[in-house]
Image: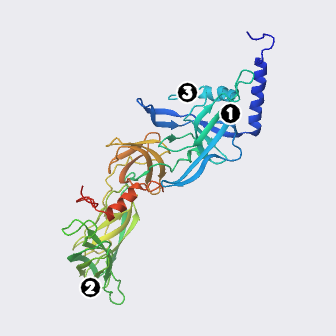
Amino acid sequence: MLNPFFQNGTNSEQGLIQSLVNEQLRMYGVEVYYMPRKYITKYKVIKEAIQSEFDNAYPIEAYVDNYEGYGGQGTLLSKFGIQEQDDLTLIISRERFENYITPLTKNLPNIELATRPKEGDIIYFPLGDRLFEIKYVEHEQPFYQLQKNYVYQLRCELFRYEDEVLDTGVETIDDEIEQIGYIQTLTLVGSGVTATGTASTCASGSVQQISILNMGGGYTSLPKVAFSSAPSGGVTAVGFASLSYDYVGCDGKSGKVVSINLTNAGCGYTVAPLITIQGGNGSGAIATAGITTRMSVQTITITNAGSGYTFGPSITMSDPPSGQAGAGIGTISAAGIVTAAYITNSGFGYTEAPTITFQGPGVGTDLGGSFIYNEIITGSISSTTARVKEWDAVTNKLEISIVSGEFQVGENVTGEESGAKFMIFDTKTDDLVTPYADNDNIETEADAIIDFSERNPFGMP
C-alpha cells in the first residue's frame, strides 16, 4: 500500500496547478471559438455523418503549441488543384471546458458528447481567420502530474467543407463558408404590380405595321433593322427584330425573323420606308412597312415598370373616334419588371394620345419579404428544400445550397424563418458563384466539342 503520509497529490495541490495553468493560458493564449458538431443525420451501418450543423460558438482561451507556424504539409499543388494541408495543435484548460462549455452544451439536441472536446468539432482560429477540425483529443499529456490531468491537447486539421450548416450568429465565423460548396441560383419574382405607360402621337406619316415577307434563316443573334430616313423635319422609325427557333430548319442554335417591333414608329413619311435587315450571322429576311396619313401612336413611354412579370405583357390602346386601335408588347428583365415597350401596330384615327394599358403580371399579391442567411426554403409544388446562401433584393436572385430535389419554374418558395415568399422565374443549376465548382460548365463546353448523342465518338466496343 502507498505511504499514507506522502499523498503526492492533494486536492489543494491539484487545484493550485490547475489555477496556474488557467492563468498561463489566459496570459499567453489566443481566444478561439469552440463549435460542437450537431449530428442531424447519420448512416447507422457505417456511422457516417451525412448531415451536421454548427450553430453555437463558445469563446475559450487556447495556447498555440506549434508556435513557429502551422504544421502539416502546407500548400500542395496536385492534379486536383491547390490544396491546403495545414495542421494546428492547441492546448485548452480542462477545468475551463468542463465548467464553462459543458453546462451550455450537455442539454443541446444531437450533441453526442459534451463532457470533453470531441473529434469532429470545429475550432475558429482568429489569427488566420480559419476553421480547423479536431482530429484527435489527447487528454493524458502531461501525464498525471500529482495524479491528475489539467489540459486537453487538440490536434486539428484545416476544415474541409462538405455541406455542413454553419450558422453561429458570429459574422466573422459564418462568412467563412458563405460562398463555399455547390451553389444554385434562383431568379424570383415578387408581388404582381401592373406596369403603366403613356403614348405620344404623330399627326401623319408614321409606320403603322410591318409585314414579314421572308423570315430568312441562320440567325444566331438579333440582326440590325434599319429604316430609310424620313423627309426633312420628320422622325426616322426605329425597330428591332424578334427571332424564333421553332420552325423547320432551325437547329436550336439558329433561328428565323418572325417580327419587327417598333420603339419609334417615326413621323412625317410620305411614302413607306424601305427596311434593311443585316447581321446576326443569317440572311434572307425581307420585310415591308405600311404608313398612315392620320394621327397614330409614335412612341410608348413606361411610367411604372411594374413587378412580378414572368412573361412579356401585351399592350392595348384605347379606341380612336374612328380608325383602328394600336397595340404593342413589353419585354421584361430577369427580376420580373417591364424594361421596354414596343409598338406592333401604331393604329390610326386618333384625335389625342390614347390610354395605354399593360397586361397584368398574373402572380399573386401575397408575395414578398426578405430571405435570411442559412434559413430553409421549401418549394410549394416540388417540396424541394435548400439553404439560403445569399439574397439580392434588387435583382431578385437567390443563391442556395444543400438542395434536396429539383425546384420547378412557376412554383412558390417560402422561407421557414423569414416567411418571405416568391415565385420562381428561372433556375440555374450550374454553379455561377463558386469558382471551383465548374463541373457543369465543363460538361456543357465538352458537349459542344464531342457529340455523344448518336454513338460513342471514341469507337464502339
Report the disc number at residue 124.
Answer: none
CA distance separating discs 2 and 3: 82 Å
The image quadrant of residue 158 is: top right
The extreme bottom residue here reads 232
Q: Say which element carries label 1.
A: strand
Mark 2 or mark 1: name the one nearer the start of the chain.
1
Q: Going 75% across and 31% down the picture, which residue do you hit?
A: 21
Q: Going 36% across and 62% down the picture, which residue do you hit?
A: 445
CA distance separating discs 2 and 1: 84 Å
Q: Which residue is mark 1?
A: 92
Residue 364 in sight in this render: yes
Q: Going 34% across and 41% down the picture, which residue do you hit?
A: 383
CA distance separating discs 3 and 1: 17 Å
Of badges 2 and 3, nearer the viewer stands 3
Which of the pair 439/135 is nearer the observer?
Answer: 135
Q: Residues within 10 Å of mark 2 (few under 14, many from 20)?
A: few
Amino acid type of the residue tagged 3 in the rendering: Leu
Q: Is residue 12 above or below residue 55?
A: above
Q: Which residue is mark 3?
A: 113
In the rendered structure, the answer to whether residue 372 lies left or right of residue 273 reads right
Q: Say which element carries label 3.
A: loop
Q: Say which element carries label 2.
A: loop
Q: Which residue is mark 2?
A: 274
**Spot occupied by residue 100 in the image (x, y as percentages of width and height):** 66, 28
Q: Quadrant of the N terminus?
A: top right
Which of the pair 224/134 is nearer the observer?
Answer: 134
**Spot occupied by residue 198 in the image (x, y as percentages of width and height):** 36, 68
Q: Quadrant of the C terminus?
A: bottom left
Which of the pair 92/424 is nearer the observer?
Answer: 92
Q: Going 69% across and 42% down the picture, which residue do you hit?
A: 66
Amino acid type of the residue tagged 2 in the rendering: Leu
In the rendered structure, the answer to whether residue 17 lies left or right of residue 237 reads right
